[in-house]
Amino acid sequence: MNVGELIRSANRLKREGKLDEAIAEYYRVIELNPNFAWAYSNLGEVFVKQGNLEQAIDCYSNSLKINPNSSLLFYFWGEALSKQGDLENAVRYLRKAIEIKPNFYKFYNSLGQLLTQQGNLYRAITNYRRAIELNSKNASSYLGCCYVYLCLGNLTKAKEYFISAFKLDPKNAKVKLYANFFTIMDGLAARIKSEFQTDIQSLIDNLSPHETPKEKCCRKFRKILKLVKTYEELALQKDLMIPELHEFHFRITDIVLEGGDYISMLKNLHLFLKPNTYIEIGIETGRTFQLASSSTISIGIDPKPQLTYKLSSNSKVFTMTSDEFFQSPDILAEFKGQTVDFAFIDGLHLFEQVLKDFVNLEKYSSKNAVVCFHDTLPLDEVTSRRRRSTRFWTGDVWKIIPILKEYRPDLKVFTVATKPTGLTIVTNLDPNSKILSKNYDEIVSKYLNLNWVDNLESRYEMLSVVNNNWLNIKNRLKFATGHK
């Protein structure tokens, strides 16, 4: 094939999702024509799809060396950097794209998203509005403004922009989520109007949460959360679950927590750690379990799996509880004699079971292994209770963090503020430690009735919360595990 035929073949493979084959073809193009800027760019796009952001950034860098005046290449580079967590440089490259091509709405829309993540809310609005001026038919820019005004606690302006987005694209999945959000808010407003003889916006404006700068960053929408908690408590008094609050809670976590979700973080962890062995407790549909590489020996444990994702030939699912699995006399045989390199615990939402799972896992783990817990950063007190009263529910898994910090200070524990309910990462394991198992009953008794910490700063300190920034997380793991 000549270069033209190869690039068409590579592009076709990319569209079909055959990413490894597409990568090989793009490299053949580059070998034949090392000055073909768009071959590097398209290769970068494939790496982004795979989650290989560092390689993608290298590709965009090489592409810009060949074509330094391409606004699109600066845009692609900025987008990749933003996914990696390097927001400052991402903003810089997007501004460079705008400098070269000042009348393309997509650049302003993306810059608005980045500025929102940085907390530069009014600048974000300016860029979203400029995007709307350039393309008034793009629902995403209106939703961006809606999101920012929600962060600012201005429901009236937020709803105005939502209505514009809804008129443009009512079938859009994100628009539908916001529609559910405002449906709940309308119901809440009616209840407040009836019970308080006032409107919801007045209550929000008059609330004074006395936030520190850190609190403002972590929970910009806390005023409305307080009202939601009141709403939840009313339902609990009548022993009712409020199913429609499910989507509302997800919208709130979108506002409260910056960056990607826990699945994106797990994907990054798999790519970085390249584990030989992986175990996941609570696989359900297999959505996170299938993130493991085909070369990784993977074990999934779930008493009632409902698999909808294709798993690799190196994966094996045990339809049983984790307690039953760990009663096996020869667990390491399932890993062909190797210890566990990476584990994800997402089973029962009760701290005592999570603690038991960790104790059992650590016995079979390497010292440089990484263990993750899901649902460790609850949205509020109601959704973190042991007794489930809302569909959006974390249970009291969060207690595992103060437990490990108290009884196992040798462990390195931190919680990444991922959507929707956080992801805790534990390193520096000791498979010979017996401290947790010997003190299990004492720990459960001590922590069973541990009170929720309402103060945000104190709670984040207790849970060792860090920002959702992959560059920082990767550096922590390099230091803790020796991975490069």
Image: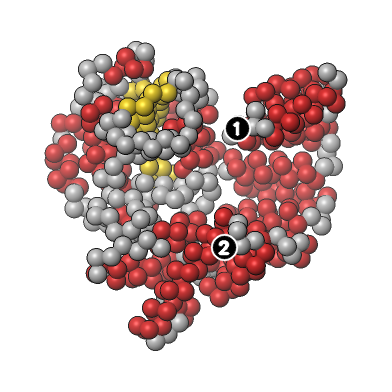
Position in image of residue 283 (x %, y %): 38, 35
Q: Earlier in the sequence, mark 1 or mark 2?
A: 1
| Disc number for residue 182 | none
Q: Secondary structure at mark 2?
A: helix
Report the quarter where the N terminus lies. top right
User: Which residue has dot 2 on it?
Assistant: 147
Position in image of residue 196 (x %, y %): 37, 84
Q: Amino acid at mark 1?
A: Gln
- Residue placed most toward the observer, 401 or 232: 232
Position in image of residue 227 (x %, y %): 39, 71
In the rendered structure, the answer to whether residue 245 lies left or right of residue 217 reads: left
In the rendered structure, the answer to whether residue 158 lies left or right of residue 109 reads: left
Q: Residue at x 41, y 83 (%)?
A: 193
Determine if residue 367 is in view: no
Q: Residue at x 29, y 34 (%)?
A: 303
Position in image of residue 184 (x %, y %): 44, 68
Q: Secondary structure at mark 1?
A: helix
Q: Residue at x 80, y 46 (%)?
A: 71
User: Which residue has dot 1 on it?
Assistant: 50
